[in-house]
């Protein structure tokens, strides 16, 4: 559903000419979608009892703890988008930090996909892919202000530091795999639990 919303917003932003109208509708559509996903998550949580449900050959695992975190992340994201969509505070500083760009909601949705999948992961490889998916939107959000030299510099610096961190994460995953032959967290936890130190 999030991917369909992202594709719709991308197409909608290319069709419309009025920038202010596009900004308002982007935020409204994003907030309505997130409300709908929250309601869907709450309604599916009780009758289906998804706790202990595995996806993609146990690479993603849904537990009762994950469902609460999912609702918390959706609630915080909705509040951030509502705060950014309205500048009714009357405080000049708070009105200045809101970002009146239509691409902001698309980047927030890309980041939200990574956030929602991050706590569901049960594998080292899927964890790395999800962290990279989430970090791509952070690179763009960091360098979002094109007019500022410092924003562009911060985005480029963040990109280089994140590339170094990705190399370190991949080296750690490869070391764990070469030492144990496992990438699943359940297997790694059971292996570490049975080892006497």
Image: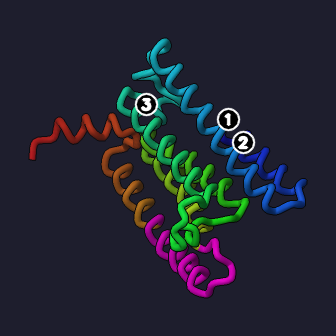
Badge 3 marks a residue whose secondary structure is helix
Quickly name the residue at label 2.
5
Q: Position of residue 142 (x, y in %)?
A: 56, 71
C-alpha gap between disc 3 and disc 2: 22 Å
Q: Position of residue 78 (x, y in %)?
A: 55, 45
Residues at discs 1 and 2 in contact (Cβ within 8 Å) = yes
Looking at the rendering, the stretch of residues picked out in magenta corresponds to 143-166
Dominant secondary structure, magenta: helix
* Badge 2 density bin: few <14, some 14–19, many ≥20, Cα 10 Å: some
Residue 8 shown left or right of residue 116 in the figure: right
Among all residues in the image, which is located at the extreme bottom?
149
Quickly name the residue at label 3.
67
Q: Nearer the viewer, residue 159 or 182?
A: 159
Image position of 59 with respect to 45: above or below: below
Quickly name the residue at label 1.
1
Badge 2 marks a residue whose secondary structure is helix
Residue 116 shown left or right of residue 87 in the figure: left
C-alpha gap between disc 1 and disc 2: 6 Å
User: Quadrant of the rendered structure where residue 5 is?
Assistant: top right
C-alpha gap between disc 3 and disc 1: 17 Å
Q: Residue at x 53, y 61 (%)?
A: 89
Q: Residue at x 46, y 67 (%)?
A: 167
Residues at discs 3 and 2 in contact (Cβ within 8 Å) = no
Q: Residue at x 51, y 73 (%)?
A: 93
Residue 23 shown left or right of residue 176 in the figure: right
């Amino acid at each position: 559903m999030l991917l369909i919303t992202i594709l719709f917003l991308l197409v909608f932003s290319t069709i419309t000419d009025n920038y202010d109208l596009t900004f308002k509708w982007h935020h409204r559509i994003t907030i309505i979608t997130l409300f709908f996903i929250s309601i869907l998550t709450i309604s599916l949580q009780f009758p289906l009892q998804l706790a202990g449900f595995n996806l993609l050959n146990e690479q993603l695992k849904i537990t009762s703890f994950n469902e609460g975190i999912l609702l918390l992340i959706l609630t915080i994201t909705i509040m951030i988008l509502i705060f950014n969509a309205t500048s009714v505070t009357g405080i000049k500083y708070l009105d200045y930090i809101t970002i009146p760009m239509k691409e902001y909601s698309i980047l927030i949705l890309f980041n939200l996909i990574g956030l929602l999948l991050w706590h569901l992961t049960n594998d080292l490889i899927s964890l790395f892919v999800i962290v990279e998916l989430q970090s791509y939107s952070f690179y763009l959000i960091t360098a979002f202000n094109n007019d500022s030299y410092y924003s562009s510099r911060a985005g480029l610096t963040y990109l280089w530091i994140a590339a170094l961190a990705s190399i370190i994460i991949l080296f750690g995953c490869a070391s764990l795999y070469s030492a144990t032959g496992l990438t699943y967290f359940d297997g790694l936890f059971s292996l570490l639990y049975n080892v006497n130190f």
